[in-house]
Amino acid sequence: MNVFRFKNQKERPESLEHKDSPNYYWVIGMAISALMLVLILVGYVWTPYSTTEMSGREKFLSPCLSHPLGTDNFGRDLLSRIMEGAGSTFLIALCVILIGGIIGTIIGSLTGYFGGMADVVLMRVCDAITAFPSILLALVLIAVIGMGKYQIILILGILFIPSFARVVRGEVAKQRTLNYVQAARLMGASHMRIIFLHILPNTIQVLLPILTIGFNNAVLAEASMSYLGVGVLPPDASLGRMLSESQTYLAKAPWYALFTGLAIVLMILGPSLLMEGYQHRKRKG
Amino acid sequence: MKKRIFALFLSALLLSTVLCACGDAKTEEEANGFGSDGTSSSGEPVNGGELVVGISQDLGDSLDPYQMVAAGTKEVLFNVYEGLVKPDSSGNYVCAVASDYDVSEDGLTYTFTLRENVLFHNGDTVSAEDVLYSFETCAATSVEADLVAALSAVQNISAEGNQVVITLSEPNAAFICHVGMVHIVPADYADQATAPVGTGPFKFVSRSVQESLVVEKFAEYWGTPAYLDKVTFKIFEDPNALMSALSAGSVDMANHLTIDQVDAIGGDFVCLEGTMNLVQALYLNNAVEPFSNEKVRQAMSHAVDVDAILELTSAGYGAKLGTSIYPSFGKYFDESLVGYYEYDVEKAKALLAEAGYPDGFSMKITIPSNYTPHMNVGEVIAEQLSQVGIKATIEPVEWETWLTDVYAGRNFDSTVIGFTANTLYAGALLNRFMSDNESNMINYNNPEYDALMKQAAASTDDAEQTALYKEAAALLTTTAANIYVQDMADFLLIKSGVEGYQFYPMYVMDLATVHYVQ
């Protein structure tokens, strides 16, 4: 059933890539993702130090053997804080793309397949939501329902629905005119069966990139909101909040901002490179 | 009410907006000689010279002495306006426009003798009519609720020659402090809001909104004239901009800085350390469970390590407090109350168990998120409370939300904030804990305290009154009304070669004593 897709991809110019060169995107992406994932997963059960314990004597320690990433303004171990912060950011981002992805895909599939009035209305609603800068909209919603981890997940999840719905809708609308769908219809398959068993698996090619992009956006959105002080509440660690705190001590403790920022960068870079690598692999067959 | 509270907290605002300042890598702390005040002079004062002072907020409201709302505005215009009496740097009220005053034995009649030939900045001589006009206008239009309340007790005010006689309906030992807040202005002069005229050591020259305010030495000043010829107050709403202006040398002086800002600054400056003159504490809503239980509050007091808080949030700077009085209050401040609750986790746990909370409890600390110092202190307190099993979460809120929900609505568990005082009179800090006071945000209800406060207010004997207020303040400590933290450190940077700056126990910036040295 992937006949058309393969044909298209064979036609792409691949002059810049040697057939035998290793897939660096894949390798590096894998390494970064694995590193972050290990840090995050280990961080859920164990951190080198307590993430909240403060010590006046250990304020602003530069990276050393006992504190590999140094300590912050309250003498808390930065590695432990980053493990916890990355953990909560990861969890939030994951929940956000799950909510946005599942609801968005369902809406997109249904509207793309059936079209009609519901399609027009829902897509205009999506347009309206995307027309607002999402952070601004999130801030407004925060003001209404209050702040906290779960509120952030809910709000960002809802805001991420349109991006998924839109892409899936376009792909489903394209696929439904193809022969295999017509064939399935002739065989008497129900609409739901066609949408979710026949068409949806074929949208995976477009769904994967937007899931990755969505994850990255969710990480950034959570970090920005915590940076603005409306995300994860202290004393829980959050990368965004740590970044905003570290700003005051940029001259005194540059490693604070550096490692916190680096953690955010790696969290985003890992999945992006993986995605890129995956597509290269696909292309090579 | 709201406006006054706004003014009270503006001081904290100045500290709060701390962002990073690009630091000079070569900054050495030794270059910033720390002194407790500016009195240690190393050279002969010279007359003349100009000074540019960086201030961190616009004088957005009216410059009219009775309409000034923001603490930052009053701080600057302290140089322009004076009352019959005015505070000095040790907090005593000394004669200004009046040369002498006399209080009758029953404490009801105040007789002020006007100083001869005191001139307004517009050249007119101050007359008794101007004084009467000032008092009447102030009583009728002032935005200071405390002051209006004090003036409402004035039964009669009259002028006889160069004497002004004020008769009160009931004695008020703090009345002279309030007289000091009634700035004397020329009668029937309508432009105070834009072109203020007073009797102070500096006269107003010009103001450009959101940019600067310029004052010049008033040569015909009745007292010791100012040294400086001209002072420009430059407004930097962005703390980073202020710090770079200081580093670049375009600003000679700035106050209300944090230790982090001071650490980061390059250039040739002397750093003076003062205090913010406020009572920073974890204020507990005494009306809600479990804070209604005195043992719980005492347990929390034992669980909080103030030394560690200072060490963690301000490199150890700041004055520890044991009650709702800060050290600048002089005679009312009781040193023995500092450290009344020694840091003792075991004792705290035992007290919690006694109170029926052996496993601790959960609580919320609501803090206005724009005040970084309060946020930092809150975070440390939350960590310290967790050691005794109390799970404290911090809820950052907008300033406006704090005012409506926490302050006015009293809908909160606990909050970290600083309370300041308008006058150096114990009631300014202590009245708010009387059970029927409208500012009794924490719902403190102690009949014994109310009785002591009423007795103190009615007392006309200064020593007795002081003792009663101290007793009331001690009661706040022993009943652990709040978890007292500190009077925050306040740093001032001044170009080296400029000396004579004096800290006041209140929120003013007196430039009359500042001078260049040879």
Image: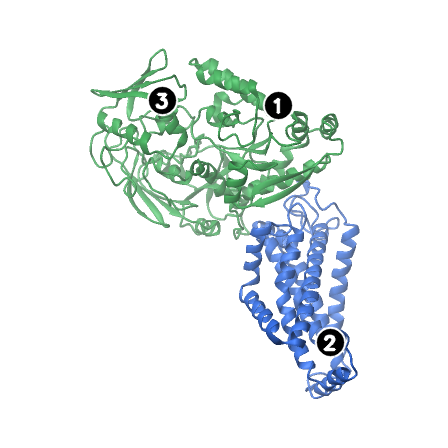
Chain colours: A blue, B green
SS label for mark 3: loop
Pinpoint residue B243: horizontal percent, then vertical percent: 47, 49
Secondary structure of the residue carrying tag 1 is loop
The 10 Å Cα crowd at callout 1, few under 14, some 14 to 19, many 20 or more, is some
Query: What residue did someone put label 3 on?
Result: B153
Left or right, B38 with respect to A222, comes to left
Quarter holding residue B390:
top right
Residue at 59% from the left image edge and 27% from the top image edge: B481
Q: Amino acid at mark 3?
A: Ala
Q: Nearer the viewer, residue A108 or B70?
A: A108
**Relative to residue A239, is residue B65 depicted above or below?**
above
The residue type indicated by label 2 comes to His
- Residue B203: assigned label: none
> The C terminus of chain B is located in which quarter?
top left
CB contact under 8 Å: marks 2 and 3 = no
Q: Residue sitting at 37 percent across and 35 percent down?
A: B143
Residue A98 % position (x, y): 71, 63
Mark 1 belongs to which amino acid?
Thr
Between the residue at mark 1 and the residue at mark 2, the CA separation in whole angstroms equals 72 Å
Q: Chain of mark 1?
A: B
The local secondary structure at tag 2 comes to helix
Determine whether label 3 and label 1 are within 8 Å by CB.
no
Residue sitting at 31 percent across and 26 percent down? Answer: B84
Q: Name the mark on residue B479.
A: 1
Label of residue A191 in the image: 2
- As measured in the structure, the alpha-carbon distance from the residue carrying label 2 to the one carrying label 3 is 84 Å
Which of the pair B118/B228 is nearer the observer?
A: B118
Q: Are marks 2 and 3 on the same chain?
A: no
State the residue in front, A110 or A241: A110
Disc 3 versus disc 1: distance between alpha carbons?
33 Å
**Residues at discs 1 and 2 both on one chain:** no
